[in-house]
Image: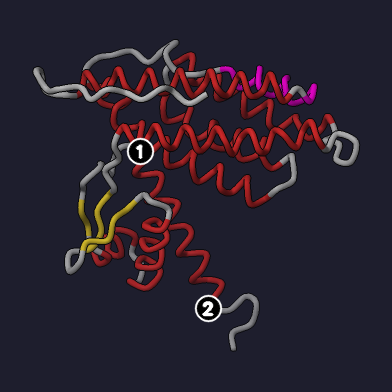
Amino acid sequence: MPGPDGPAVIRSTLRQQIADALRDEILAGRLVPGQEFTVKEIADQYGVSATPVREALVNLTAQGLLDSVQHRGFRVHEHTLADYRGMLQARGLIADAIFREVATTAAHHSVPAAGFVSVRRRGEEAARAAAAGDLTVLIGYDLRFWRELSALFGNAYLSDFLHRLRVQSWVCAVPHLRREVERGGDLRGRLWSRHLDLVEALTCRDAVLAHAIVAEYNTHSLELIESLAAADRPEGARTPPAPQAPA
């Protein structure tokens, strides 16, 4: 049996590196919804064997980012607006569950002020990127911000689930946002940037205010993506009625 630093660990690390690289390619819009590829193509691209690539692709499929296509390989999953609405509702519920811990465990679980230093730094960078309309930088800092912020309050399962939902929602939104840029649209001032307001609410253990900020975030995001999706549709295409935005 291999030791702790043996081949199994090396393969696991390589699998995760490939999965992370492909996820970043999807978030950057270089792998687009509906695009197909094979294990061999990815293995050749990264100069590695097929086994860790296959494991990475299966992992991304389990995360809802890829689809397995029988006898053909894998395809970047094509999300719908209904998917996006569901993701926003789900991540709002998970965020509330995490933030509820802020109010109910104040006497038992105190987050030291130093614990917010890194989170604030991520929030500052995310807000700056949002104001500048820099989508690539925003996504990176936004994911780190939420990952670190949710990790401060203890429940690793909720934190991991929220991170997965946030990755999926960015993957769903990215094609619409990038097409807006390709059309000559300007994202400056149109992307949510209240990261520091949320940090301050949680520093004060104000779960009610945190809920309100996240609800506003979800409403803002849904309205933006729905408007961009409408611009993406061919002229004359029918627009299905939108359900009520998540509270």
Residue 227 in the image, given as x and y percentages of width and height: 30, 17
Which residues fall within the magenta stretch? 194-205
| Residue shown at the point (53%, 18%) measured from the top left | 216
Q: Quadrant of residue 162?
A: top right
The three-letter code of the residue at mark 1 reads Asp
Residue 91 in the image, given as x and y percentages of width and height: 53, 36
Q: Are marks 2 and 1 in contact (CB under 8 Å)?
A: no
Estimate the spatial distance between the alpha carbons at disc 2 and disc 1, rounded to whole Å: 39 Å
Of callouts 2 and 1, the N-terminal one: 2
Is residue 221 among the parts visible in the rendering? Answer: yes
Question: Between 140 and 215, which is closer to the camera in this rendering?
Answer: 215
Provide the secondary structure element on which disc 1 rests.
helix
Residue 7 in the image, given as x and y percentages of width and height: 53, 78
| Residue shown at the point (59%, 89%) measured from the top left | 1
Vertical placement of 36 versus 116: above or below? Answer: below
Provide the residue designation for mark 2: 7
The three-letter code of the residue at mark 2 reads Pro
